[in-house]
Image: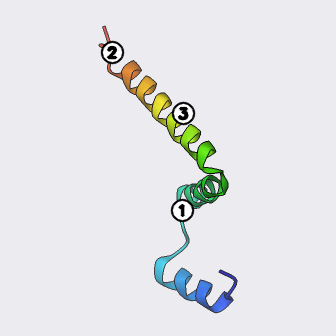
Amino acid sequence: MKNPTLIAELHAKLGAPSSDAVESLRLLKAFLKLAPGQRIEVVELVERLTSEHNSETDRPLS
């Protein structure tokens, strides 16, 4: 998006994006640049880390 008028119109309508939104878009852009095999590895890694985190938080507190 290099059209300053369009950017200004979007900013006026939507406001400034949150830093989380900007970071998410940056990561998505980087993810899409990966080769398909690398994308699969990233998805598997995230799924593994998520399941490990969930199993840790499912433990009883006592």
Question: Three-letter amino acid code at disc 1?
Answer: Ser
| Mark 3 vs 2: CB contact within 8 A | no
Quarter-wise, where is residue 20 in the image?
bottom right
33 relative to 50 in the view: left or right: right
Q: Is 24 or 12 nearer to us in this picture?
A: 24
Residue at screen point 41% across, 28% down:
51
Q: In the rendered structure, which amino acid carries the disc numbered 2?
A: Arg
Neighbours of disc 1 within 10 Å: few (<14), some (14-19), many (20+): few
Amino acid type at image mark 3: Leu
Residue 18 is marked as 1
Image position of 45 with respect to 62: above or below? below
Query: Quarter-wise, where is residue 16 in the image?
Result: bottom right
Return the disc, 2 or 1, that comes first in the chain's sequence: 1
| CA–CA distance in space, label 3 to label 2 | 22 Å
Q: Which residue is mark 2?
A: 59
- Choose the circle earlier in sequence order: 3 or 1: 1
First along the sequence among labels 3 and 2: 3
Using the image as rendered, state which of residue 37 and residue 43 is in the foreground: 37
Q: Is residue 30 above or below residue 6?
A: above
Cβ–Cβ under 8 Å for marks 3 and 1: no
As measured in the structure, the alpha-carbon distance from the residue carrying label 3 to the one carrying label 1 is: 26 Å
